[in-house]
Amino acid sequence: MTTTLDAKSGTSGSVPIEISGIFISPAHDFKGHHGKPRGEHPVKALEIVACVAGKGLVGDRYFGFKDDFIGQITFFDVAVFEAIRRRFDCPDLQPSVFRRNVITEGIDLNALISRRFRINDVEFMGSVECAPCHWMDLAVASGVEQFMKGRGGLRARITASGSLAKGSQTLVVLPVL
């Protein structure tokens, strides 16, 4: 079940969530490859990841990419992943194919755009939707890019360092500063 937050209210609150996957990759498979074949860089599944404020996830391709980068970490909803598996008849599809960092369950990620939130001791600022690109059709199946529009996940900045681990967590929406 996904909890929906009132993104306009500005109120704080907490919701239980599940982190079912954490992924990093040392290099880009898609970015900078327009008109060329995709890269073949491995995606590494982790149980826990270090999050560094203003930098990103240790070991990930976007770590220290540029100052105040909006996508220091990306979140993706397991419900969208499961819907894609069903709709496109891909029962063996793995969530790592989307190259998002953290797979969550229990929160409407779009409600966190422009919101401050915390999971464990790590604080984030939701930036924008992690909009799908044309590569999704190549990585998964034709039509996936269109299917993911409006539900491609969340890009966020890391504003306080700490670590994230797989398992049951509490997401706390923080008041606006």
Image (spheres, rainbow, N blue to C red):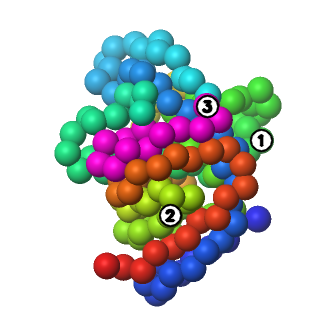
Give the extent of the magenta segment.
46-57
Sequence order check, earlier mark of 1 and 2: 1
Closer to the camera, 118 or 7? 118
Residue 118's tag is 2
Gap between marks 1 and 2 measured at Cα? 31 Å
- Taking 37 as reference, is 5 above or below it? below
Gap between marks 1 and 3 measured at Cα? 26 Å
Closer to the camera, 132 or 113? 113
Q: Secondary structure at mark 3?
A: strand
Residue 162's tag is none
Q: Secondary structure at mark 1?
A: helix
Per the picture, the main secondary structure of the magenta-coloured stretch is strand
- Taking 138 as reference, is 129 above or below it? below
Name the residue rendered at 67%, 58% in the picture: 169
Label 2 Cα crowd, 10 Å radius (few <14 / some 14-19 / many 20+): some
* Residue that carries the numbered disc 1 in the rendered image: 86
Q: Secondary structure at mark 2?
A: strand
* Residue that carries the numbered disc 3 in the rendered image: 46
Amino acid type for the residue under numbered disc 3: Leu
Amino acid type for the residue under numbered disc 2: Arg
In this view of the protein, can residue 141 be seen by the observer? no
The image position of residue 89, as x and y in percent, is 77, 33
Asked whether the beta carbons under mark 2 and mark 3 sit within 8 Å of each other, the answer is no
Is 118 left, or right, of 128 in this rendering?
A: right
In this view of the protein, can residue 47 be seen by the observer? yes
Q: Quadrant of the C terminus?
A: bottom left
The image position of residue 91, as x and y in percent, is 79, 31
- Taking 112 as reference, is 29 above or below it? above
Gap between marks 2 and 3 measured at Cα? 20 Å
